[in-house]
Amino acid sequence: MTLLGYRLPGMSSLIIWGLLWETVGQSGLTFFIPPLSEVVATLFSVIGTAAFQKALAETAYAFFVGVLSAICIGIPTGILMGKNRLLDELLLPWVNVFLSAPLTALVPVLMVLFGFGMRAIIITTTLFAIWIIILNARAGVKQINRSLVDMARSFGASPVDAFFKVYLWAALPEILGGIRIGIIRAVKGVIIGQLLISIVGFGALFELYAANFLMGHFWAVLIVLFALAFTISEVLAYLERRVSYYAAKR
């Protein structure tokens, strides 16, 4: 970020937005935005409570299981679609439909099929993340240099060997990009699931604080959620940059 010709350190914009938030909160324009100092103080008072730790554990469990399911299903499906034209023509329209469709409308259907428990929340999280992972894995396979595949075949590589030793590694930059975007979408999926399917985890805290107009508590939990999602996204973005660098060098 550059201001008046001076290059400011990274994340400086957050300081500016924090000062703006504090100013708006102190002005009392709306009860919905309390001062940032009050939100931070509330965060430190809430973060050690049993209710917050239980909500964090429930949300983390649903999130990581949902993302892991999306990765384990999405990457092989995307690679197979990139390799097999028939499979690609059969599945690609459906992948595009679910990627662009408002998946929140499917939540009542999931509630009927899988009940009101954690399983339905995990499936909701998976559905939010999986489609972009499939498309990115497919795109990664589509751009693989055919000489790599021909070389593997000439050395007698089996389809399984080619899958794990050629397609997976050659498409890894695109796959990591899909996982990073899928994780961002999964955050939305897990909160929507916890709000609409079963009031547990962070969804229960959001419901409780909003109903009782505890805006400081509401924003404190929201900051934790955003910070966790941002941290995971930045770690994956770093890995994506490193993999892309080595892929370009190769």
Image (spheres, rainbow, N blue to C red):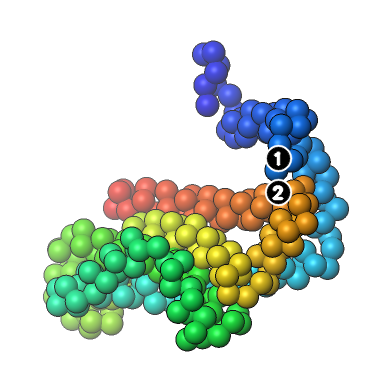
What residue is disc 1 on?
33
Crowd rating for badge 2 (residues with CA inside 10 Å; few <14, some 14–19, many 20+):
many
Tell me if residue 231 can be seen.
Answer: no
Nearest to N terminus: mark 2 or mark 1: 1
Residue 233 placement (x, y as % from top left): 52, 53
The answer to whether residue 206 is above or below residue 152 is above
Q: Are circles 2 and 1 on residues that touch, CB within 8 Å?
A: yes
Residue, x 53% and y 50% (percent of image)? 234
| Badge 1 amino acid | Ile
Label 2 vs label 1: CA separation? 8 Å
Q: Is residue 198 left or right of residue 55?
A: left
Return the residue nearer the eye: 8 or 88: 88
Which residue is the site of mark 2? 219
Q: Residues within 10 Å of mark 1 (few under 14, many from 20)?
A: some
At 40% from the left edge and 63% from the top edge, which residue is drawn?
102
Q: Amino acid at mark 2?
A: Trp
Q: Is residue 111 above or below residue 59?
A: below
Observer-nearest of 225 and 124: 124
Q: Secondary structure at mark 1?
A: loop
SS class, disc 2: helix
Residue 63 horizontal/vertical position (percent): 57, 69
